[in-house]
Image: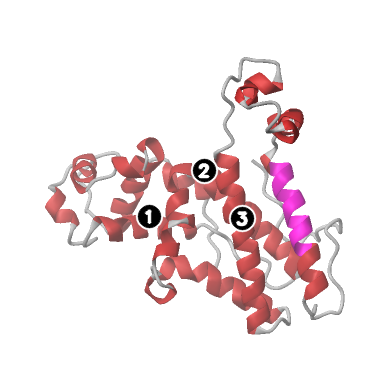
Amino acid sequence: MSKKSDRRSTSRGVGKTDDGPITRQRILAVALEIIDRDGIEALSMRRLGKALGRDPMTLYRHTPSKSALLDGVAESVLDHLEVGDSGGDCDWVTELRAIAWDFRRLALDHPQVVPLLVTRPLSTPLGLRPLGTLRPLEAILALLIRAGFTGAEALHIYRALFGFLHGHVLTELQELVERPEETDDLLRLGLHRLPIGDFPLLRGLAPVLASYDGEAELERGLDILFAGLAATLTDPDDQAPAASEPVEHVCRSTPST
């Protein structure tokens, strides 16, 4: 699964009312713009109809309910997650590392959509989820099976990777500083409010907590995850590619923010 278009285009240049035809793609693009700007709760069929310059009832011809609309928005975002772009020329660790960085970029581009990508699917049985949200799973399973893993091993790797990724993006997006103007880390994080005797370790880690770096945390977490997977699974090549190995020119480079 590969989308060559700029993933950032999903949130730009949409929502401008004109006399063009109403399509599902256009509806989803404007819905995404509303969510990006004001959050999921701000999206309604009435507001969407107003943004499109159409009677809200006409939208139901393309999306039967708000729930289906939200699923469609999630699909439209995940459609920009690139999986297996190197045509199998890279090792599985390099491929999955690139996918992880791609997922983080999508999350940072569309932070308001993250609940639709992370928590909403969990409330729906796997077979009833929108097909677009299952395609990354299918593509990653195919990638890993091509690399020589069994289906069960591939599923285990997928679950471990996305379990970590979901937790990471939620943590990164919710790392809040109470008083950013303060220079003292305890004050910046509000940790001075905690009883000294009850939370000495947390207070002592204030400088580390205050210097949270999402990129560094992701990279370190991926290193630990892949090292653990390589140690417990049967590597098809009998050796796990090291995290520090250089990426060949045919492989996708790690995205930067």
Q: Which residue is mark 1?
A: 73
- Give the main secondary structure, helix, strand or loop, of the magenta stretch: helix
Tell me which colouring the rendered structure shows: secondary structure
The residue labelled by disc 2 is: 109
Element type at mark 3: helix
Q: As shown in the figure, which amino acid type bears the numbered disc 1?
A: Val
Residue drawn at point x = 71 percent, y = 34 percent: 202
Decide if residue 73 is in sight here: yes
- On whether residue 224 falls in the magenta region, the answer is yes
Q: What segment is highlighted magenta in the picture? A: 215-226
The answer to whether 39 appears left or right of 81 in the picture is: left
Marker disc for residue 165: 3
Tell me if residue 216 is in the magenta stretch.
Answer: yes
Q: Earlier in the sequence, mark 2 or mark 3?
A: 2
Tell me: residue 225, above or below residue 44.
below
Residue 129 lies, in percent from the top left, at 39, 69
CB of mark 3 within 8 Å of CB of mark 1?
no
Q: Nearer the viewer, mark 2 or mark 3?
A: 3
Q: Residue at x 53, y 67 (%)?
A: 136
Mark 3 → mark 1, Cα distance in angstroms:
20 Å
SS under mark 1: helix
